[in-house]
Amino acid sequence: MIVELNSSDNKLIIDTTLGGRATQFYISGLQILGPSGDHPLIGGWYLMAPWAGRISNNEIRYKNKNYKQDINFQNFAIHGTAAFSEGQITNQSDFSVEITHQTDKNWPVLATIKQKWKLTNNFLETSAQISCESGEFPAQLGWHPWFKRQLAKGKPARFGIEAISQYVKDENLFTLNETKPIAIPPFDDAFDVPSGKGFIEWPEALRLDFQGNVQTFVIYDEPADVFCIEPQTGPPDAINQNPLLVSPGNPLKASVKWEISRS
């Protein structure tokens, strides 16, 4: 199902069959999201849940048990399952929509994933939570937007996050639970951002200033035409290395507010 949120001259188009993904985001007539690619994880703006990024050995480890997850991109079980499953609309208005997913058979605890998009004249708010009615298990949340470097007007994008360090990766490119000084771009890396703040600016066109209650951002800026700035509740594989537990009455929640300025 296609959902269209409108507020003033902002428009967000969401496809519930593609995991509740935003496929287009127009601000003052300018479409800012990267187009779909040859794989479902390329393009648009989607929720990563119940884990984000790559997980070592394609499994979740908890209490001395290993829970294998389905490989969904190249040789990896990456970015969770919500982006691959059709969501059900549970609340909707002209400017907001809530979409619900359930974890699959590989998740030992039946958990509910809810994501919400809220669009106003001045900001977009993305929020999500993972909850369960019984049991206990680690979880992780994040968002994966693909932004265009060049819009139909203005200059190419520039962007930044208030990072204080960069997470280390091993020889197989899996993120470790340790940090180092920030290197030189391009990046396909996770960063420690205690303030949860950053910005994207297309000079002479638009600017987004964002802040979330998360302290990790992944930047992927290797492509020439698009880039990704991904807010997450922890770095990739944190679900195995520094897990956040979901249990009844203790959901995992995250939100990011993207404030809009026009040139």
Image (cartoon, rainbow, N blue to C red):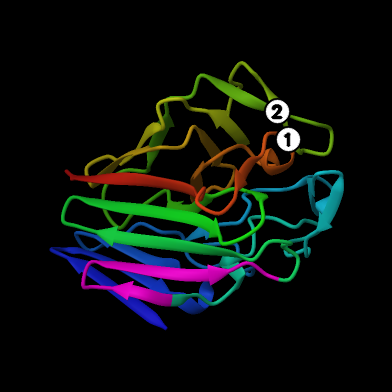
Tell which tag, 2 or 1, sits nearer the viewer.
1
Badge 2 density bin: few <14, some 14–19, many ≥20, Cα 10 Å: some
The residue lying toward the viewer, choosing from 237 and 209, is 237
Residue, x 78% and y 61% (percent of image)? 69
Residue, x 34% and y 77% (percent of image)? 3
Q: Which mark is residue 241?
A: 1
Residue 228 picture location, percent across and down: 50, 47
Query: Eyeballing the image, is 211 above or below 22?
Result: above
Q: Is residue 255 left or right of residue 170?
A: left
Residue extending furthest toward the bottom:
1
Q: Which mark is residue 177?
A: 2
Q: Is residue 102 visible?
A: yes
Q: Quadrant of the N terminus?
A: bottom left
Q: Which mark is residue 261?
A: none
Report helix, strand or loop for mark 2. Answer: strand
Most frequent secondary structure within the magenta stretch: strand
Q: Is residue 197 left or right of residue 137?
A: left
Residue 189 picture location, percent across and down: 62, 35
Query: Eyeballing the image, is 215 above or below 137?
Result: above
Amino acid identity at mark 1: Gln
The residue lying toward the viewer, choosing from 122 and 133, is 133
Residue, x 59% and y 74% (percent of image)? 85
Tell me where the magenta segment starts and ends, as one range: 89-104
The residue lying toward the viewer, choosing from 180 and 139, is 139
Query: Eyeballing the image, is 185 above or below 134?
Result: above
Q: Quadrant of the C terminus?
A: top left
Amino acid identity at mark 2: Asn
Report helix, strand or loop for mark 1. Answer: helix
Mark positioned earlier in the residue sequence (2 or 1): 2
Residue 155 magenta: no
Whether the residues at callouts 2 and 1 have beta carbons within 8 Å, the answer is: yes
Residue 100 magenta: yes
